[in-house]
Image (cartoon, helix red, strand yellow):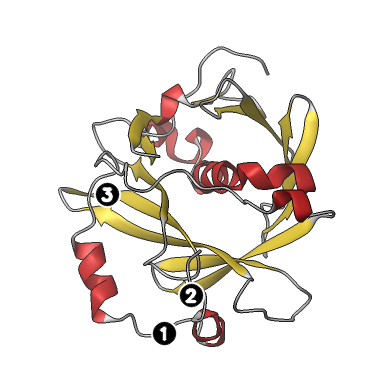
Amino acid sequence: MVAESHLNVVVQQPYPTLPTKVYGAIARLPTACLRTSQYPLLHYTNSAQISGPVVLQFVRCSPFAMVVTEDLGGVSHPETGTKYHISVGVNIWMPNCTVTTIRRGPTEDGRLVAQLELGIMAGPATVTMAGQCRPLSSIMHRKSSSSSSRTYDLLDGRSLKWKLHSDAWRAYINSQEIASFDPTPPRKLILLPTAHRFTDHIIVCLVILMREHLTPKTGLVGDASQLFNYSPYFHTGDD
């Protein structure tokens, strides 16, 4: 378990000066397809002990990062409250393409969960988890460009299905709702007890879906929307 003793610093200083090692890490940030087999896919090991919904919030902790923490009604629990650290850098060879890194715990030193390479680039959008780099189009599907549903391959024979409504995005496995997310600020995620073993995947999905959600649509920018390598990932499938 990653030590989480720095949460107070993160929460109390929403725009701290980044330490030198963070800037160095951003400068050295690899593309998402580098092997990461030393970082096995993680999940909650104590999910069986969770009996009710858990609310997670997304809190910006620097110009380049945010943390995912439990929303406990204003009560801070530094040792247990922070679940993920999400940071963004760029592909040095193509700065228009961002590399988003998701780690466990409150800092950039936590165990690596995933790296996502999304943006304007000739190559495809990619997702790297558990040491394997895959094109986004091989794990995230939609029936058409206007579909309000997304299907995410959990890579174990099961799928996580998202239904994207204007007021909430709801996640299902085998038709059972396991989580919901409000895409409008302050953007909170509600996990039901059955969701916790899939939390890594849920967080990865939300990063992808929010990137898509906040990208200008064809109606505003015309064909320029196709410049983003995550825009054409849809394939025929269940809606």
Q: Residue at x 48, y 75 (%)?
A: 61
Which amino acid type corresponds to the residue marked 3 in the rendered image?
Answer: Asn
Specify the quadrant that holds the C terminus: top right
Real-space CA distance between mark 2 and mark 1, rounded to the nearest whole angstrom: 7 Å
Task: Identify which residue, 196 or 238, lies in the foreground.
Answer: 196
Tag 2 near tag 1, CB within 8 Å: yes
Q: Residue at x 67, y 65 (%)?
A: 186
Judging from the image, what secondary structure is the residue with disc 2 in?
A: strand
Of label 2 and label 1, which has the lower sequence position? 1
Task: Identify which residue, 150 or 20, lies in the foreground.
Answer: 20
Which amino acid type corresponds to the residue marked 1 in the rendered image?
Answer: Pro
Spot the residue most to the right.
52
Residue 110, image x, y percentages: 41, 63
Mark drawn on residue 16: 1
Q: Which residue is mark 3?
A: 96
Q: Residues within 10 Å of mark 3 (few under 14, many from 20)?
A: some
Q: Is residue 226 visible?
A: yes
Real-space CA distance between mark 3 and mark 2, rounded to the nearest whole angstrom: 23 Å
Residue 209, image x, y percentages: 55, 42
Real-space CA distance between mark 3 and mark 1, rounded to the nearest whole angstrom: 25 Å
Image check: 194 left or right of 233?
right
Q: Which residue is mark 2?
A: 61
